């Protein structure tokens, strides 16, 4: 994993994980488009009423974009572009840049269509990842227009933006739990496990014990709030990412939220890179 100290290699690893996550999302969203997209309550004429009232021209433009024919076209393009990202360095740099822009625009359109994050935090983190990549591309473009030699500045801008976004998400999640008495005393954990994929909990489950539930809850709270400490050393960063992967894997196993696993795992190369970068400056 020492190769992740190189911003270019770290960004390529991040793009690879993001591409895998986007492909998984694409297969899920394709089915969603065929089912939820046909439901009367999910039509754009209903979900976009606020735009129709305040920005009628924008509403009509989006209405055309969100027609099934047009939506199928750009949604299919999104899948092809995500697939192309798996080939990484074998693709011409300009095509890579164009691919990132296409994915970013399609993510924005998808979230506008459903009036926000249909799949919750995973959609928001996916957008944050793409925001970081677009920001890096914009930085590289500005440097090129200024006549400067190619450098890793754009890559580092992308990586550090994603580091800030991902660590903030963990800290905010931990802080919210810390403020909630139901999480501090373990009742929230029991409630969620009762409503999990394999729930409800059995009457003799150890997680029904107040002390066990409280211990697990506080473990989550402390771990999430302490995530920024991974920046102190690359070894800490690797251990923290491994712990995070196990955590998101458990969330996937118990709640079926596989999109969270892919979205946050895509951030790990950036986090490890950041730890190496700070170590080098010290």
Image: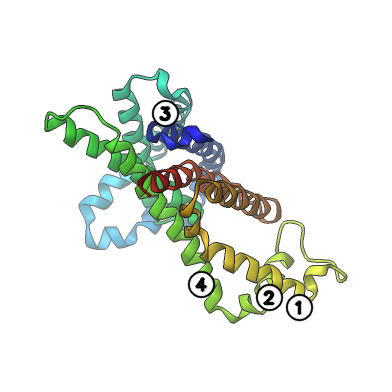
Q: Residues within 10 Å of mark 4 (few under 14, many from 20)?
A: few
Residue at the outermost front position: 282
Q: Give residue 186's mark.
A: 2
Residue at mark 1: 210
Q: Is residue 65 visible?
A: no
- Is 250 rendered above or below residue 186? above
Q: Is residue 121 visible?
A: yes
Residue under the image location 39 percent in, 48 percent down: 278
Residue at mark 3: 81
Label 4, secondary structure: give it.
Answer: helix
Q: Give residue 21's mark.
A: none
Residue at the outermost right position: 204
Label 3, secondary structure: give it.
Answer: helix
Q: Nearer the viewer, mark 1 or mark 3?
A: 1
- Dots 2, 4 in contact, CB < 8 A: no
Frontmost residue, 228 versus 2: 2
What is the C-alpha distance between the residues marked 2 and 4? 14 Å
Res 201 quadrant in image: bottom right
Which badge, 3 or 2, comes first in the chain's sequence?
A: 3
Q: Residues within 10 Å of mark 3 (few under 14, many from 20)?
A: many
What is the C-alpha distance between the residues marked 3 and 2? 43 Å
Q: Residues within 10 Å of mark 1 (few under 14, many from 20)?
A: few
- Dots 3, 2 in contact, CB < 8 A: no
Which badge, 3 or 4, comes first in the chain's sequence?
A: 3
């Amino acid at each position: 994993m020492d190769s992740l100290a190189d911003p270019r290699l770290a960004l390529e690893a991040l793009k690879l994980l993001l591409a895998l996550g986007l492909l998984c999302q694409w297969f899920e969203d394709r089915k969603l488009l065929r089912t939820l997209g046909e439901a009367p309550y999910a039509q754009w004429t209903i979900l976009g009423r606020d735009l129709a009232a305040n920005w009628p021209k924008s509403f009509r433009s989006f209405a055309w974009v969100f027609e099934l024919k047009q939506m199928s076209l750009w949604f299919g393009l999104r899948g092809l572009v995500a697939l192309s990202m798996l080939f990484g360095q074998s693709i011409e740099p300009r095509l890579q840049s164009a691919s990132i822009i296409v994915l970013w625009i399609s993510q924005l359109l998808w979230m506008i269509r459903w009036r926000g994050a249909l799949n919750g935090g995973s959609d928001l983190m996916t957008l944050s990842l793409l925001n970081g990549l677009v920001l890096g591309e914009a930085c590289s473009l500005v440097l090129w227009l200024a006549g400067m030699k190619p450098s890793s500045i754009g890559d580092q801008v992308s990586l550090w933006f994603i580091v800030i976004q991902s660590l903030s998400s963990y800290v905010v999640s931990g802080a919210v739990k810390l403020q909630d008495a139901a999480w501090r005393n373990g009742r929230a954990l029991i409630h969620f496990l009762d409503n999990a994929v394999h729930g409800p909990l059995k009457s003799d489950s150890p997680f029904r014990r107040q002390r066990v539930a409280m211990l697990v809850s506080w473990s989550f709270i402390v771990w999430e709030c302490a995530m920024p400490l991974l920046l102190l050393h690359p070894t800490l960063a690797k251990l923290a990412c491994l712990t995070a992967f196990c955590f998101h894997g458990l969330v996937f196993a118990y709640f079926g939220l596989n999109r969270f696993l892919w979205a946050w795992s895509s951030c790990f190369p950036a986090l490890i890179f950041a730890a190496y970068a700070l170590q080098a400056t010290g």
